[in-house]
Image (tube, helix red, strand yellow):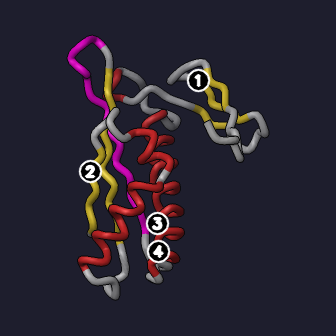
Amino acid sequence: MSTRIYTAVATSSGRDSRAVSSDGKLDLTLGLQKELGGDGEGTNPEQLFAAGYAACFASSMQMVARRLKLDVADAAVTAEVGLSPNGQGGFQLDATLRVELPDTIAPEAAHALVEATHQVCPYSNATRGTMPVELVIE
């Protein structure tokens, strides 16, 4: 195992509580989604995962684009994270990443960029083989 370059630490007591990072920069009210019987107030773990995945994939894409000499300054990534029953009494996640790229990038180059990004993004590497991830270039 390689040496860690950063460790994030956050504490929560559940979906209907708070989430607080050890440095105090993150302090969120969490709320159970209406679809799960809650009032829908506050954010939820799936929204936090979607925000993290979108940001991580976008940053990874910028790194890969520099290597490929592509300009992705106007690019954006939207992550949709779904929560579904797993058929065994628990739940599972799935994700769709919608990647918006500048029109100046040819379709073949866009596809190569997104696929290469999916290979280096830490979230993609963490979820590979454990949850379905669909990549959509818009």
Q: Which residue is mark 1?
A: 17
Question: Horizontal and vertical percent for residue 112?
Answer: 31, 70
* Magenta residue span: 76-89
Residue 128: which quarter of the image?
A: top left
Rounded to the nearest angstrom, the CA distance separating label 4 from label 3 is 6 Å
Q: CA distance from mark 3 to mark 2?
A: 16 Å
Task: Please report the residue visible at 34 percent of the width from the left and 48 percent of the height from the top.
Answer: 80
| Residue corresponding to mark 4 | 65
User: Which mark is first along the chain, 1 or 3?
Assistant: 1
What residue sits 69% from the left and 42% below the top? 4
Report the mark closest to the observer, 4 or 1.
4
User: How far separated are the C-alphas under marks 4 and 1?
Assistant: 39 Å
Q: Earlier in the sequence, mark 3 or mark 2?
A: 3
Q: Amino acid at mark 3?
A: Met
Q: Which residue is mark 2?
A: 134
Q: Is residue 13 left or right of residue 55?
A: right
Whether the residues at callouts 1 and 2 have beta carbons within 8 Å, the answer is no
Queried whether the magenta region covers residue 31, the answer comes back as: no
